[in-house]
Amino acid sequence: MAESESGAAPSSERESALAPLRHLVFRRVWLASTLANVGGLIQSVGAAWMMISIAESADMVALVQTSVTLPTMLLSLVAGATADSLDRRKVMLGAQIFMLIVSVVLMACAWTGLITPWLLLLFTFLIGCGLAFNSPAWQASVGDMVPRKDLPSAVALTSMGFNIARSIGPAIGGAIVAAIGAAAAFAINTVCYIPLIAVLARWRRPENPNALPRETLGIAMAAGVRYVAMSPRICAVLVRAVVFCVGAGAVMALMPLIAKVLIRGGPLIYGLLLGAFGAGAVTGAIGNARLRAALSTESIVRWASTAFAAAAAIVALSTQLLATMAMLFIAGAGWLLVLSTFNVAVQMSAPRWVVARALSIYQMAAFGGLAAGSWLWGAVAESESIPAALLISAVVLIGCAALGRWLPLAQSGELNLEPLRSWKEPSTAVTIVPRSGPIVITIEYVIREEDVVEFLRAMSERRRIRRRDGARNWRLLRDLSDPRAWVERYETPTWLDYVRHNSRMTQHDAIVPQRLRALHCGPEAPRVRRMIERESTAVPLEGELRERETLIDPTRYS
């Protein structure tokens, strides 16, 4: 595969599902991550089978899956805000080193016989914490490694890399556990972290010296939640992801019991079942590009959810290894197609400044559903039976497909979320500094009576965008003495927040102000007033009296 000096193949190369691998940095990180995932799956097999040997109850076995996924639900938003605020490479590097240390301690406890069911859950929980911080940084970094046109395929490849590991890691892990023991599986996992740590240590992301000052963690988290809450496209993905993962969690959490009770096998059979699931996911990833070209986003999710549901139902009734493996192959393909489609939908619906936080909230929803489902289906299997849990989960998956009638997914790639970069920081007669505020902004329009309905519709979208990007106390006012006069009013806490708010406007967002300007019938453009709120007894800040601090030109913000 030929490469340019920048590490990318010539543009004439035919696009395919593997096209993102032509980018050198993405290829290196992807390969190292796949190896780390192989080690993680080997460790998971060891942990699950060790739990079966030291705790016989079904709910304790299912809690192994919960302990890995629960940290993502609890920590994902913090991790996403961290990934958007700090160097994502360093976040990934720190997470990998942390998981390496925890895995070494887990290995030592297993070798010395000190492991207990609750201690095992603690170690898997800590490893899950490392994964919670690594995942948003890794997925958000994909957009930094490949151009936007390759992003859907790159997202599918990240899922494919994990599922390549899923197709071979569990089988290897099962063989290792059967031949040597779980402690050996933990030891191999520790070695698999090293190549990714080395690749991340060598990678140098381009510096962005023109970025706005970093938000505090709390403010960054609030901005991420606000953005997602005010984005209907992303909210639809979150609801669908929760329902799907609750249903899919049955197959994932009960896999050890399917192997031991329904198939009457050992750790090697468990590894083969996981391998069949992973092989199906790899197949789904390979066919993902063609499916996206032939079907809508909603159609992919509906058909894949239905296929997963049918597979889960047949697994519940099967006692034959080959039949169960065949159904898990189908379930794996459905799993990959649904989750990668959700992931792409989120990435394509969020601009770069907030993409890690949007992905982290999506992961909170998905892994929260998976964690809740793992506990739920473990409890159902314990009180009723394993087949009953799988059959009920199939009904939930059908419900996910049916939800498309009320919460359809938007087609990926419809929005241009590149920064608009046309807004310039205005000069002010009053001396201000970045922390000056609160800032009150009013925009005055003159609207003909016959255009009022269309104006109000545009303003409804304007309100959503303003609030989504950080504006407070948004109001629309009409002059009682002149019915053609309208005023849009909103606030920001500081001047820096005002600059940040306007720098977040995307090419797609610009459609709304263009509509409003077209409706304005005044002799000049809509008048904008920027005011600073002051109490009558307030004393100006020392910095405001001493000197004016010039902000970075927001047209250079990325």
Image (tube, rainbow, N blue to C red):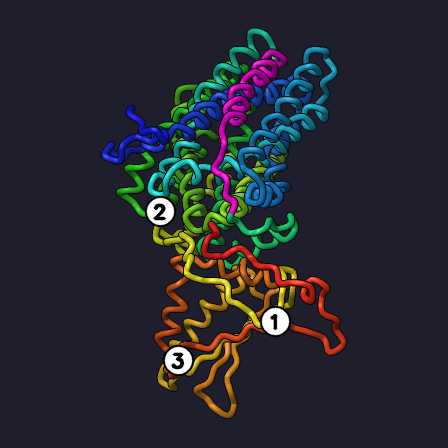
CB of mark 1 within 8 Å of CB of mark 2?
no
Q: Which mark lies nearer to you, 1 or 2?
A: 1
Q: Quadrant of residue 190?
A: top right
The residue that appears at 28% across and 33% down in the rendered structure is 16
Q: Which mark lies nearer to you, 3 or 2?
A: 3
Q: Is residue 326 left or right of residue 171?
A: left
Mark 2 surroundings: few (<14), some (14-19) or many (≥20) residues within 10 A:
many
Task: Identify whether 208 is placed above or below 331.
Answer: below
Residue 48 shows in the view: yes
Residue furthest to the front? 546
Mark 3 and mark 2 lie on one chain; the one further toward the N terminus is 2
Instruction: Please give the label number shown on residue 297.
Output: 2
Magenta-drawn segment: 182-209
Mark 1 and mark 2 lie on one chain; the one further toward the N terminus is 2
Q: Magenta part mainly helix, strand or loop? A: helix
Q: Secondary structure at mark 3?
A: loop
Q: CA distance from mark 1 to mark 3?
A: 24 Å
The residue that appears at 49% across and 14% down in the rendered structure is 172
Task: Identify whether 122 is placed above or below 272.
Answer: below
- Quadrant that contains the N terminus: top left
Q: Amino acid at mark 1?
A: Val
Mark 1 and mark 3 lie on one chain; the one further toward the N terminus is 1
Q: Position of residue 281 (x, y in %)?
A: 40, 30
Q: Which mark lies nearer to you, 1 or 3?
A: 1
Q: Quadrant of residue 148?
A: top left
Let me know if residue 521 is in the magenta part: no
CB of mark 3 within 8 Å of CB of mark 2?
no
Instruction: Please give the label number shown on residue 430.
Output: 1
Q: Which residue is mark 3?
A: 524
Q: Amino acid at mark 3?
A: Glu
Mark 3 surroundings: few (<14), some (14-19) or many (≥20) residues within 10 A:
few
Q: Position of residue 275 (x, y in %)?
A: 45, 21
